[in-house]
Image: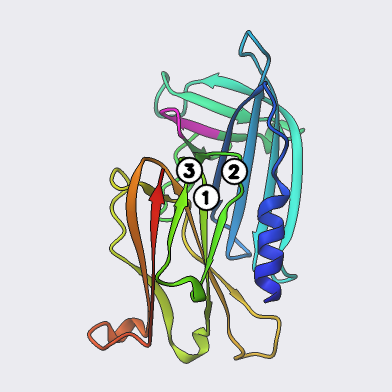
Amino acid sequence: MRVFALFLAAALAGCVTISSSQIGTFAGVLPCADCSGILSELHLYAEQPSGRPTRYELMETYLAARDGDRSIGTAGLWAIVSGSASDRDATVVQLDLGRLDAARNFLRIGDNELRLLDRNRREIFSTAPHSLHRVSELPPVTLLEGDSGQTIEVDPGQRVFVVLGANRTTGHEWALESLPGKSEGPLIRLGDPVYAQGATQLGGGGTTLWFFAARTRGKQELRFEYRRPAQRDSPAAKTVSYTVSVR
């Protein structure tokens, strides 16, 4: 599928050679005003051995935009800034995108999460995820509908992408069943799922993309059901499941 091929190429395009000065890679799907989601991959580098922030590399892929998937890569300097609008003791990672009014601010949540703030370092109140999570440099594992029933092994930090064909014009949607909460289970979601309409004629269907990352050792089942949301008491039209084992 063209959408899947473009998505996979874009997802891998931000990968760089591991450097001794690289202190972390963070990834996630951030909200987008005119597309289905922004697949973001941020690499942070620091001077060694001082640990002083130096440069960043950011790859952003706008998924299912009006003109198709498109990727934008930026690089520059980053810094650690003390204090957010609501917490003077907060630690904020600030990306300098060339202009003060374009600086990107992320609130540091522990060692493994960066949560997007607005330009004035204020919290963004929304039900949509606004976080990037620490991931490894290992390439993502992609699961298709035909892989249902399989058990796959991944390493901590490795990403898992699920790509399922869908056609929302029929009223059917894929739903993820019973994923543990944010603080539970070996997998964490990297953002909301994204639906990409196919390039064929209207009504021809598209693709639903799900994004996860392995966090801790253990096993977890990913089960998806394809149904009309208003008919949850009826049998699903299709069901797929995968078992992910984090080594």
Lateral position of residue 202 relative to residue 232, left or right: right
**Image quarter in which the N terminus is found:** bottom right
Q: Of marks 2 and 1, which one's residue comes earlier in the chain? A: 2
**Mark 1 sits on what residue?**
159
| Extreme residue toward the left, this view | 233
Lateral position of residue 90 relative to residue 74, left or right: left
| Front of the two marks 2 and 1 | 2
- Magenta region: 106-112
Residue at screen point 37% across, 85% down: 228
Asked whether residue 120 appears in the rendered view, the answer is no
Q: Position of residue 213 (x, y in %)?
A: 47, 48
Instruction: Tell me, for residue 36, which label it has, or none.
Output: none
Disc 2 and disc 3 in contact, CB within 8 angstroms: yes
Does the stretch in magenta take in 107? yes
Instruction: Tell me, for residue 155, which label it has, or none.
Output: 3
**Mark 2 sits on what residue?**
138
Q: CA distance from mark 2 to mark 3?
A: 8 Å
